[in-house]
Image (cartoon, rainbow, N blue to C red):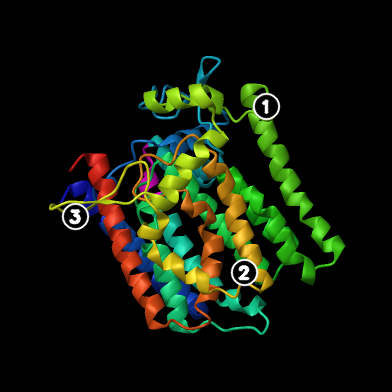
Amino acid sequence: MDARLIGVLASLSLGLGLTVALVICLQRRALAFTLVFVATALVYALSSGPFLAQQSDAPHYVYLADAFVHGRLWLERRPPNAEEGDWTFYDGKWTVSFPPLPAILMAPFVAVSGTDFNDVVFTLLLGALNVALVYEMSPHFGQRLEPPVDLTRPARVGLTVLFGFGTVHWWVASVGQVWFTAQIAGVTFLLLTIHETLGRGRPVLACTWLSLAAIARPSMLLALPVVIALLLPANAPRRMALGVIPLGVAGLLLAWFNWARFGDPFELGYRYMRLEGLLARIVEEQGTFSVAYLGRNIHYALLEMPGLSSRWPFVVMDQWGMSILVSTPALAILFAAPWRQRLAQLSLAGALLVAVPSLLYYNTGYMQAGDRYLLDSLPFLLVLIGLGMRGRLRWPAALLILVSVLMGYLSVENFKGMYFEWF
C-alpha cells in the first residue's frame, strides 16, 4: 500500500477515534449519530483506495477556496488540466463556474493548508455526515402520517445502510472531484432541509438549508414548493414569510457573485467553460438544456443494463449511466408507500421536480458507475422508502437492501476500474 495512503488513513482513523471519545465524554445523546458518521467515514476511506492518497484530479473548489481566502473571485494562476477539466476562462482570467458553496465550506481548511488541501478527504467526510443525518432524521418520516408510524431501530439502520452503501452515494462520496463534491454538499443541505421540515418545521431554518443546498446544486431549489406545502399546516403566514429572508439573501449574493465575475447576475459562467471534445460538440449542437436529451437521459437512468464479464468485478457498467433500478433495487420498496397520504405525494413531487433539470441536461453524468444524478432526488426518495417500510424492516426489504449494497460495492469497483483503466 502507498505510504501516503497509509498516512492519510492513519490520520483519519486517529481523528475519528478522538471524535468518538470526545462525544462519549461530553454528549452521550449524540453517540449513535457519531458512531454512524465514524463507521461510514472509515468504510468510505478504505473503499476510496488510490483516490485517498492525494488531492483529486479536479480540485476546482480547492482553488476557488484559495481565491476566496485571499479576497479574489478569480484564480491566482492557471489551474491544473485547464483545457479540458471544466475550468472557466473569461476576460483573461481563470475561475470556477460551479456554484460556490463547497469552496466556501473548504475555505477555513485551505487557509491553513493552501492549494494542496485534499478534497477527497473533505468529500468523504461530508458524505459520512450525510449518512449520519439519514439515521438521525429517519424517525420523522412516519410521524407526519395519519395515524403516525414509528420506525423501529432495525428499519432506521436498514434505511441508513441503504443510503450510505446501497446507492451511488458510496462511490460519489469516495473519490472527490468538483462534480461529485458539489453533489455531496447539495445532498447534505437538502437532507437538513427535510430534517427541519418534517421535524420542528421552522420556515426560516428550512429555507436557510434549502438556500445553501441551491448554492451547491441549483436544481434543488425546485423543491421549494414541496417544502412550503409541508410547512404550511403548522405555520402561520407571518412565520412562513420569514422564510423569504434567507432565500432572498442567497439569491442576491449569488447574483452579485455572477455580476462581479461576468458582468451578468444570471451568468454562472457555463458558457465559457472548457469542455471535453465530445461534450463540447453536444452542447454546440443542442445547447446545455433541451428536450432533445430527455429520451437518452431516461434510457440511461431507467433502462440501461450492465454487461457481464468473466473477470473481476464481473459486472461491467456503462460510463454514461445505468438503470437506478439495477444499481439500487431497494428503490422498489417505495412502491409500498401509503400513496393516499399527503407526505408520500409531496415526497414524490419533490423527487420529480429536482430531477427535471438533470433529465433535460446535455450530460448524463459521464463518467460514472450508475446514475449519479439520482443523488439530487434521493433525499425525497428515502422518505418514500421509509414510508414503504411501514415502520418495520421485513425480510423482503432487508434482502433488497443487501442486494443494493452489493451493487453499491460493485459500483465503487467499476468507477475505479474506469478511472484508472484497470479493465
Q: Earlier in the sequence, mark 3 or mark 1?
A: 1
Residue occupied by mark 2: 344
Residue closest to the eye, 291 or 146: 291
In the rendered image of this protein, does residue 142 appear above or below residue 181? below
Question: How far apart are labels 3 and 1 at the CA level?
Answer: 50 Å
Q: Say which mark, if any, is on residue 392.
A: none
Q: In the image, 327: left or right of 215?
A: left
- Residues rendered magenta in the picture: 116-122
Query: In the image, which is nearer the foreground, mark 3 or mark 1?
Result: 3
Identify residue type, mark 3.
Phe
Residue 107: % across, % down? 51, 42
Residue occupied by mark 3: 314
Image point 71% across, 68% down: which residue? 201
Q: Say which mark, if any, is on residue 259.
A: 1
Q: Residues within 10 Å of mark 3 (few under 14, many from 20)?
A: few
Q: In the image, 54: left or right of 66?
A: left
Question: How far apart are labels 2 and 3 at the CA level?
Answer: 37 Å
Identify residue type, mark 1.
Trp
Q: Quadrant of the C terminus?
A: top left
Examine the residues drawn in magenta and state their main secondary structure.
helix
